[in-house]
Image: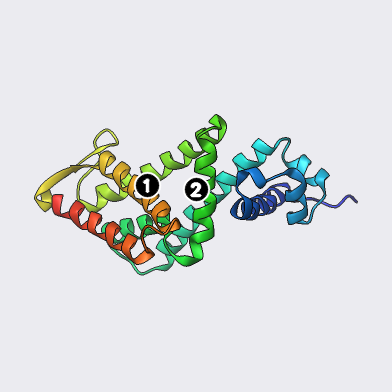
Amino acid sequence: MPKQVDHEGRRRWIAEAVCLLVDEHGLEGVTLRDVAARAEVSMGAVQRCFHTKEEMLLFAVGHVGERVTERVRSRLAAGPAQSAAGELALVAGEMALLREEHRAEARIWLAFVAGAAVNPALAAALRSSYAALEELMVRLVTEAAGGEVVGGSVIGGEAAGGSVVARTEARTLLALADGLTAHVLVGHRSPAEAEEVLHAHLAGLWARC
């Protein structure tokens, strides 16, 4: 009886090999042959999973996004019950990839962002990831401010003495987290300094609510 192959599992295994190569050499250093060697599978196995290098890179960038998202969900589920404001701070910190153990992920993510500047398909994949993160941020900002969603973007925080536009705040926070990732990676800010910037921004957000 022919051996059953976990096709999706193999694609994820290969995606991990792609990420390791991106971390070491950037997108330009990723070839089907090198990926096969790093994943310890045959060239044929890689080509059965991905017909082109671009298809392989698109899957890999989605894989990185899913890995970060799953880590956020696991931390939220494993941690003690906390306020929406606390959840938002946790999610923003995870997205910024500030901790030392996430430095490789930060390098990989920014390599994909750089590649997306000249690759429309890769840019589309990243826009999809950012859109999903933005929706999560909108929900958390809305809940933390004690308001309700109106048309998917506006919240009222009258209970806290003010109001904010959730969509704008979510976009600002997402851009801030992305920028801090780059600043820490190039050494412009230390992780501790970046966390201070993030917390100061969140404190200002709650003051406006």
Q: Residue at x 35, y 69 (%)?
A: 80
Report the mark closest to the observer, 1 or 2: 2
Does 30 sit left or right of 145 as displayed?
right
Q: Secondary structure at mark 2?
A: helix
Q: Position of residue 29 (x, y in %)?
A: 66, 47
Neighbourhood count class around disc 1 (C-alpha, 10 Å): few under 14, some 14–19, many 20 upward: some
Residue 169 bears which disc, if any?
A: none
Rate crowding at label 2 as few (under 14), some (14 to 19) or many (20 or more) other CA atoms within 10 Å: some
Furthest toward the bottom, the residue is: 80
Disc 1 and disc 2: Cα gap in Å? 21 Å
Q: Residue furthest top?
A: 120
Residue identifier under label 2: 110
Report the front residue among 104 and 84.
104
Q: Residue at x 61, y 50 (%)?
A: 22
Q: Which residue type carries mark 1?
A: Leu
Which residue is drawn at the image coordinates 37% and 42% (left, top)?
135
- Say which amino acid is labelled 2: Leu
- Residue 136 is labelled as 1
Which of the 4 image quadrants contains residue 188? bottom left
Is residue 200 visible in the rendered structure shown here?
yes
Instruction: Work out whether residue 65 can be spotted.
Output: no
Looking at the picture, how far across and down is residue 129, in whole percent? 47, 42
Question: Are the residues flagged by discs 1 and 2 in contact, CB closer than 8 Å?
Answer: no
Q: Name which of mark 1 and mark 2 comes first in the sequence.
A: 2
Please tell me in which quadrant of the rendered image residue 193 appears. bottom left
Is 106 in front, or is 8? 106
Which residue lies at the image location 80% right of the left edge and 53% below the top edge? Answer: 41
